[in-house]
Structure formats: structure tokens, C-alpha cells
Image (spheres, helix red, strand yellow):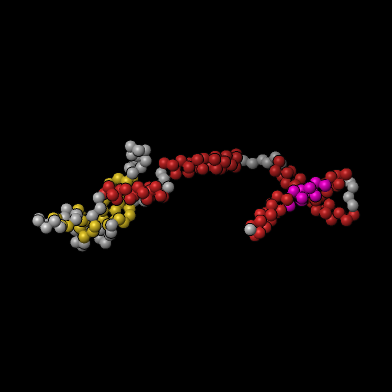
């Protein structure tokens, strides 16, 4: 508790009170200098104030001085100003129209590599994964859906599965709609 209050007070003193105190001292010294009433021990301080005020006056003169330059510099300055105004607007619109999740176009579900593209907009008003396809992660070939089989009279059977035509490896079956739900869940988390 004490450590937190110490940090808080040091911030108040450093960021608020110290600049106010320095400003008041500078103002008093400037007024004394203006009226010519400066005590001998304050002479070094007054010379610092004089140099600071002289520097500020020089900076102000430099900033407000008339400058002759070619129109090329003028147009470059205008272009820079326009760019600094319009670039944040463009970035904001681009983020709204093409959100970051649109680069998310593949993932592994159930040991199978799924790939998809994003539709423009759905009926709900948001982008959805489109053309979901399953690929063998080893061969990078689209896997074929196998219906599986059921043994008659026994009641046991084999669930549907995916099979790679190249390496003949079998993968757990997952309907495209289930994979689509997982993609949408990930999309909502990524926003």
C-alpha cells in the first residue's frame, strides 16, 4: 500500500507540481527583470532566464519569418498534409471492409487440413467461410469421403471417414458444416 502511494505522489510532484513551481519562479524572475529589480544573488538565475527568453524570441522569429520557396515545396507540403489526414481514414475503412481474419484460410480439424475462402457477406451481414475442402496433411491432396459400412445383424459398424487417394491414410470424418462452425468460432475470437 505504501509503495503504491509513494509512486502516486512522485508522479504528482514530478508531472504537475514541479512544472508549476518552475513556471512561477520563471514568471517572478521575468517580472523582476522587466522592472529592473534583481537582487545580486539572483543574477545567475536571471541570466538563465534571459537566455531562455532570448532563445524563445529567436525561435518565434524563425517560425514567423517570411520564406521564399518554389511551388514544388508548397505542393509537397500539401500532399504530405493530405496524406496524413486521409491515411488514417483509409486504414480504418480497410480494417472494416477487409478484417484480419480474412487471411485465416486453413486449419487442422480432426487430423485433416481444411481450406476455404471467405464469402462477401452472408444473410446475417457477416463474412462466412466458403467452399470448405478437406486435404491430407501429408500429401496435400483433397481427401475423398468414404461412407463406411454397417455389418448386418451385429449392430456394429464403421463410421464414415476420409481417405487419401495417394497415401491411403484414413482420417476421422467431420462434416463440412462442423468445420465451418469451428472456423466461425475462431473468427469471433480473433476480432
Going by the picture, which residue comes out furthest to the left? 153
Q: Which residues are magenta?
A: 18-28
Decide if residue 41 is on the left or right side of residue 102. Answer: right
Question: Where residue 163 sits in the image (x, y, percent)?
Answer: 20, 58
Taking depth in this image into account, of 167 and 80 the one nearest to the observer is 167
Q: Is residue 53 left or right of residue 118?
A: right
Percent x, y for residue 106?
Answer: 33, 53
Determine if the magenta segment contains residue 157: no
Instruction: Write the residue at 44% across / 44% down.
Output: 95
Q: Is residue 27 left or right of residue 13?
A: right
Magenta span: chief secondary structure: helix
Asked whether, in this view, residue 135 is left or right of residue 104, the answer is left
Residue 82: which quarter of the image?
top right
Nearer to me, 47 or 9: 9
Residue 154, horizontal then vertical, whole percent: 11, 58
Pick whichever, 186 or 129, lies toward us: 186
In the image, residue 39 above or below residue 121: below
In the image, residue 22 lies in the stretch drawn in magenta: yes
From what the image shows, is residue 98 above or below residue 151?
above
Q: Residue at x 32, y 48 (%)?
A: 181
Look at the image and tell me whether residue 140 can be seen: no
Amino acid at each position: 500500500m505504501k509503495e503504491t502511494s509513494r509512486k502516486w505522489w512522485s508522479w504528482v510532484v514530478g508531472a504537475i507540481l514541479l512544472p508549476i513551481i518552475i513556471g512561477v519562479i520563471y514568471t517572478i524572475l521575468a517580472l523582476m527583470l522587466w522592472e529592473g529589480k534583481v537582487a545580486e544573488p539572483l543574477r545567475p538565475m536571471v541570466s538563465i532566464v534571459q537566455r531562455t527568453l532570448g532563445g524563445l524570441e529567436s525561435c518565434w522569429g524563425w517560425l514567423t519569418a517570411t520564406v521564399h520557396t518554389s511551388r514544388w515545396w508548397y505542393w509537397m507540403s500539401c500532399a504530405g498534409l493530405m496524406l496524413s489526414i486521409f491515411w488514417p481514414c483509409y486504414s480504418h475503412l480497410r480494417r472494416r471492409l477487409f478484417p484480419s481474419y480474412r487471411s485465416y484460410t486453413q486449419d487442422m480439424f480432426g487430423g485433416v487440413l481444411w481450406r476455404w475462402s471467405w464469402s462477401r457477406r452472408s444473410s446475417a451481414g457477416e463474412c462466412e467461410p466458403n467452399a470448405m475442402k478437406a486435404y491430407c496433411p501429408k500429401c496435400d491432396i483433397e481427401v475423398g469421403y468414404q461412407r463406411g459400412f454397417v455389418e448386418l445383424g451385429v449392430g456394429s459398424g464403421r463410421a464414415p471417414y476420409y481417405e487419401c487417394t495417394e497415401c491411403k491414410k484414413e482420417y476421422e470424418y467431420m462434416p463440412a458444416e462442423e468445420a465451418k462452425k469451428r472456423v466461425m468460432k475462431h473468427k469471433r475470437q480473433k476480432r
